[in-house]
Image (spheres, rainbow, N blue to C red):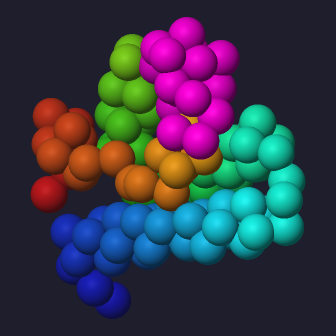
Amino acid sequence: MPEPDNTIQHLRSEYEEAVRSIASRVAMLRQEGLGEESIARLAHKERQRLTLAFKERTPEPLRSRIVERTVAEYGHASGPSIESLRQQGKSWSEIADGASRPGEAYKFKSCGYP
């Protein structure tokens, strides 16, 4: 069995790869002519699904610390709502593109992330 830090790092790598894969779906939907708002909503929903799924796979006590940090920053364990992103002035295209960019792991150093 891998060392705990290796397990966490592997999980993070897997999460980042899954998040980046949203970009190909966004590109395909654009090519199909779907509107930017619809694309953004679909991409954002998939990103939130991945976020929650990977948090469930994160071992304790790191999981609880990450959830606490995310809730403190965004008000929800899955991250910022699409409404809050729009209130920050993000366009639908920016939201769709941003859904495929994983957050910086350094933000979780304070949670005990290796």
> Which residue reaches farthest top?
87
Rendered view: 73 above or below 57: above
Write the residue at 41% across / 44% down.
Answer: 63
* Among the 4 quarters of the image, the one containing residue 84: top right
Rendered view: 77 above or below 57: above
- The percent coordinates of residue 49 (x first, y second) are 68, 50
Q: Is residue 42 magenta?
A: no
Side (left or right) of 63 relative to 57: left
- The percent coordinates of residue 9 (x first, y second) are 26, 70
Given residues 98 and 58, the one toward you in this image is: 98
User: Which quadrant: the C terminus?
Assistant: bottom left
Do we see residue 51 in this rendering? no
Q: Is residue 89 magenta?
A: yes
- The percent coordinates of residue 111 (x first, y second) are 22, 37
User: Which quadrant: the N terminus?
Assistant: bottom left
Write the residue at 65% across / 67% down.
Answer: 27
- The percent coordinates of residue 103 (x first, y second) are 34, 47
- The region drawn magenta spans 74-94
Given residues 89 and 8, the one toward you in this image is: 89
Rendered view: 69 above or below 109: above
Write the residue at 51% across / 31% down.
Answer: 79
